[in-house]
Image (cartoon, grey):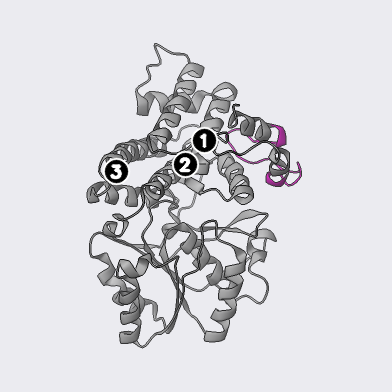
Amino acid sequence: MVNFQYYNPAKIVFGQGSQKELKRLLQEEKATSLLMVYSGDFIKTLGIYDDVKSITEELGIAFYENGNVVPNPSIELVRELVVLGKEKGIDFILAVGGGSSVDTAKAVALGVPYNGDPWDFFGEGAMPERVLPVGVITTLPASGSETSNAAILSNGKWKLGFEDDRIIPKFAIMNPEYTLGLPAYQTSCGVADILSHLLERYFSDVKNTDVTDYMIEGAVQALLVNGERLMKDPKNVDARAEVQWLASIAHNGILDTGRASDWGSHRIEHELSAEYGLTHGEGMAVVLTAWTKYMAEEKPWKLAQLASRVFGVDAFDYTETERARILSDKLKGFFKSLNLKVSLTELEIGREHFEEMADRATKNGVQTVGHYVPLDKKRIIDILEMADPR
């Protein structure tokens, strides 16, 4: 285990009816001018829009809103909202939805007090002097951004992240009833996204990490069980609640403690989704299927451990490499049970941009990505080719 500091001040308000705490939470934050960001009209169907509008009127908070958030959120909308924020004196950002809404809100929170372009934080290494507070009402369990210190943004060519503890939301309201109407595809992508966050942390080369190893293994088992339950009964609110809480646990930083998480497969997927507009969860299903197959031959030990502890693959019957291969097959089978595609071939994506994407991921070969096995340009291309078995 390596030394660490852990900090996460996000207040979690979880359960059916938890939205009733919004008034108190906004009073605690002393908001006077609020911008709500979301995607589409679903928040009106769920009653969230009217609830927020009514509460802001009751508290005398100026209310502004924008429902134009899209998957793989873009810098263009952030720039537009930063201008609005400066003009209207916005002092609180409320995100409603999933990771795209939350990451957009975080980027706006960075940009409003800043005199430059908000992309500076994502592409130029800028650090904020001040950040507006953000709150979240989550309706799509997936990214875990509602309690994380990270945001991901795209400029059409690059899909890059920014991390800073000051963008951790002040609160996250999680009502599992809000997730009951999610389309099956979004539910499946969310489960795959959560699993990817757990696995990125699990695949660490740091030794003596029993505490977080067993925590992650337990979370993976809980996700497999409840993902299967949702495939059978999408209206199972108890399974919805389990998955919603897992989304936060997987990405609130506690599972990073004492270890060096990998993130190589995420960096590959970010290039794919920037290039082709993939939904992140399905993109991770494709990349993780190929990444684990590749790592089974390159460095199998951690994969073999997960295969034995979660899937019951006996070390007496199989070698370390064989157990790692079985893990890859098990993960592939789980993603397929979610009705997700598991190869670039299925997505009808060819090989013409592999080199270009590998160049972007490695900054033209200057750096590697990932920690379990650092990936250079050649390794990234090899993994992409494994994802395209035709």
| Cα distance in 3D space between marks 3 and 1 | 22 Å
Rendered location of residue 342, percent (x, y): 50, 34
Residue 389 appears in which quarter of the rendering?
A: top right
Seen in the picture, residue 214 relative to 278 is either above or below; the reply is: above
The amino acid beneath tag 1 is: Leu
**Secondary structure state at the residue bearing disc 2:** helix
Quarter placement of the C terminus: top right
- In the depicted view, which residue is nearer to us: 293 or 250? 293
Q: Taken as a whole, is the magenta stretch helix, strand or loop?
A: loop
Rendered location of residue 12, percent (x, y): 33, 61
**Secondary structure state at the residue bearing disc 1:** helix
Taking the spot 40% from the left edge, 47% from the top edge, the residue there is 185
Please give the label number shown on residue 230.
3
Say which of marks 3 and 1 sits in front: 3
Rendered location of residue 64, percent (x, y): 45, 80
Rendered location of residue 294, percent (x, y): 58, 27
Residue 226 appears in which quarter of the rendering?
A: top left
Q: Which residues are magenta?
A: 360-378
Please give the label number shown on residue 33.
none
Magenta stretch holds residue 148? no
Seen in the picture, residue 380 relative to 11 is either above or below; the reply is: above
**Secondary structure state at the residue bearing disc 3:** helix
| Cα distance in 3D space between marks 2 and 1 | 8 Å
Q: Are marks 2 and 1 in contact (CB under 8 Å)?
A: yes
| Cα distance in 3D space between marks 2 and 3 | 18 Å
In the rendered image, is residue 333 in sight? yes
- The residue carrying mark 1 is 288
For the view shown, which residue lies furthest in the top direction? 317
In the rendered image, is residue 257 in sight? no
